[in-house]
Amino acid sequence: MNLVQTIPTMVRLGLCLCLGDAAARAATWSVAPPPNGSDTNPGTEQQPFATIQKGIDAANAGDTVVVASGTYRENIQFKGKNIVLRSADPPNAAVRSATVIDGGQLGPCVAFAGTEDDTCALSGFTLRKGAATGGHGGGIRGGAGELHTRAAVQLNHVSDNYGDCGGGLCGCAGPILNCIIWGNTASNRPALYQSSTPTYSCIQNWPGGGLGNTAADPQFANAAKDDYRLLPSSPGIDAGDSTALNLPATDFLGRPRVLFGGRRLAVDLGAYEFIPTTCTLGPGPGQATVTWGSLASKTYSLFYSHDLRQWQLANDRVESAGNLTSAWTDDGTQTTPPPSAVPCRFYRCVENP
């Protein structure tokens, strides 16, 4: 057997954004941690800057600053520039969790001047240990006084920040989309303050409102060890907005970015794309192994087909292996003919009631 597939079919989503002549004139600046990065470099992809602030300072309106994975101990300032500041792959949770702006409790992780418009964006970072003692917005401060930035804040994980008000965000009047705002502290409104209503975000102690938001624990596999995969019971599965800007077709591991996780066909919120079912050849010759996202104490039925029209039961009770994934191997003892004797076979996994 030279081809094994699983059902439901995985759907790829692509976006094409045409920006016209202005995009051709815009520059892209690169940032990477030492030893590759140095602030004496010209900021190209081959010779990147070492600090994010250097990239911002070099950029002009319409430019993009791309930040490679690493931990940047900075308190960066946009200074009113209408630029895009992003990680190397914002929709990819592995990249987001590995691209960290650590404020070191010396000030907000990110500060806007408040004059930025909707062409400005902050996308694809983990923001932690920002502090706004005696002020607002430990993770992100959107401006000062009555000035509130209109920059888009999307696909960010904002946690472990402090401010008197809005420990996570304050003064952000632009779109807040597909973010996780969790574990921030403040004497008043620890998540966000004087900001627009987020959408498709996971916000601790969120009182309600906003399309697609949840206040439920995102249920990471092991956040203490930077494992931000979602458990099968996570409210973040199928909870994101699949129309998010520049959403790629695949995630960091090359898997489709939008998978049906059992609720609706949508990108997962703020973590790795949850894998409902995958199929690989092996482990032995002529065998196929089906792997799916499972829940503890559940059982599953496995079906197979050669034409997607007629399905046959292979096993009506496969015990769950726990709250991550379970697997079943088709070795030919429960299917006819065995996998080695067919050119193509489809599999379907169903949770038993």
Image (cartoon, grey):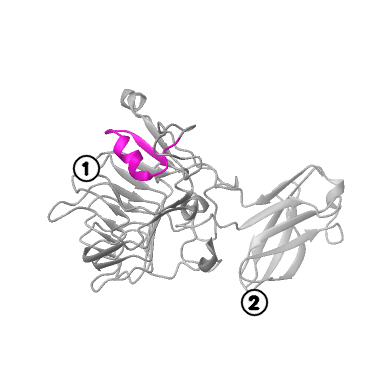
The residue lying at 84 percent from left, 57 percent from top is 331
Percent of width and height locating residue 229: 54, 61
Q: Nearer the viewer, residue 113 or 90?
A: 113
Observer able to see residue 84:
no
Observer able to see residue 147:
yes
Q: Nearer the viewer, residue 342 or 150?
A: 150
- Dot 1 or dot 2: first in sequence order is 1
Element under disc 1 = loop
Q: How many numbered tags mark residues here?
A: 2
Percent of width and height locating residue 274: 56, 57
58 in magenta:
yes
Q: Amino acid at mark 2?
A: Ser
Q: Nearer the viewer, mark 1 or mark 2?
A: 1
The residue lying at 46 percent from left, 40 percent from top is 37
Q: Nearer the viewer, residue 336 or 320?
A: 320
Q: Quadrant of residue 38?
A: top left
Instruction: Give the magenta part as a residue range.
Output: 48-66
- Label 1: how many Cα within 10 Å (few below 14, some 14–19, many 20+): some
In this figure, which residue is indicated by the disc labeled 1?
A: 80
Mark 1 touching mark 2, by CB under 8 A?
no
| Image quarter hosting the N terminus | top right
Disc assigned to residue 289: none
In this figure, which residue is indicated by the disc labeled 2?
A: 297
Kindly give the residue lying farthest to the front in the view shown: 40
